Image (tube, rainbow, N blue to C red):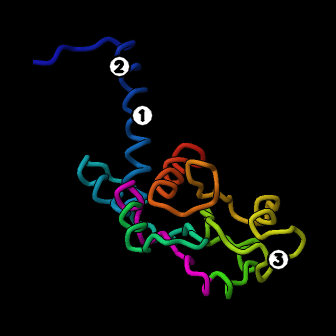
């Protein structure tokens, strides 16, 4: 049998529950399972009846030896909805990509960037596309995918570390 708590204890418990629920809401929303979670805890909200906006995307761009399927699996294991990711990770695709389409593009919430040639389509003022995107508020936030020596490299570890940093820095 549970005992009755005092107001001070209830307020402390309420703060702890709010913190816990905040993390759970972010997690289940990212997984695309927020409605299931809300139903499981018996919560009804008028927001659930509104149309869902198109999901924001995370662009991963840079030459990679890691296959897209492996990166998607890592994203899913990290709690992300794999459908949120778009990949441009082959040399040919990077070479053809016009980076100017990313300027003031609201579809992408983050860009995870790996190694690529310095000169790219859409380059306006900086010496490299990465430098141009980092220094321009018109581009989505950029996060470099780096190895243990801090060199640009798309590896399973650098991708996983970037996803963890997104959780800590941007959410």
Which of the two discs, 2 and 1, sits closer to the camera?
Answer: 1
Residue 137, x across and y down, in percent: 79, 60
According to the picture, the residue beneath numbered tag 2 turns out to be 10
Which mark is first along the chain, 2 or 3?
A: 2
Q: Which residues are magenta?
A: 75-93
Q: Which residue sits at x=82%, y=62%?
A: 136
Residue 36 horizontal side relative to residue 144, left or right: left
Any part of residue 116 in sight: yes
Which mark is first along the chain, 1 or 2?
A: 2
According to the picture, the residue beneath numbered tag 3 turns out to be 123
Q: Is residue 155 magenta?
A: no
Q: Which residue sits at x=52%, y=75%?
A: 86
Q: CA distance from mark 3 to mark 1?
A: 45 Å
Residue 146, x across and y down, in percent: 59, 55
Q: Which residue sits at x=15%, y=18%?
A: 2
The reply to whether dot 2 and dot 1 touch (C-beta < 8 Å) is no
Q: CA distance from mark 2 to mark 1?
A: 12 Å
Q: Quadrant of residue 28?
A: bottom left
């Amino acid at each position: 049998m549970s005992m009755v708590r005092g107001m001070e204890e209830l307020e402390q418990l309420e703060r702890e529950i709010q913190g816990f629920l905040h993390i759970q809401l972010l997690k289940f929303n990212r997984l695309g399972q927020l409605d299931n979670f809300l139903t499981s805890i018996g919560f009804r909200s008028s927001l659930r009846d509104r149309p869902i906006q198109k999901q924001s995307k995370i662009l991963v761009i840079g030459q990679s030896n890691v296959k897209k399927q492996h990166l998607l699996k890592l994203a899913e294991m990290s709690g992300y909805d794999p459908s949120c990711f778009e990949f441009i990770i082959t040399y040919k695709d990077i070479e053809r990509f016009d980076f100017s389409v990313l300027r003031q593009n609201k579809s992408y919430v983050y860009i995870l960037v790996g190694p690529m040639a310095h000169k790219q389509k859409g380059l306006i003022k900086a010496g490299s596309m990465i430098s141009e995107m980092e220094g321009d508020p018109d581009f989505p936030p950029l996060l470099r995918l780096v190895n243990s020596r801090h060199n640009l490299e798309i590896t399973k570890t650098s991708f996983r570390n970037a996803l963890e940093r997104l959780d800590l820095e941007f959410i």
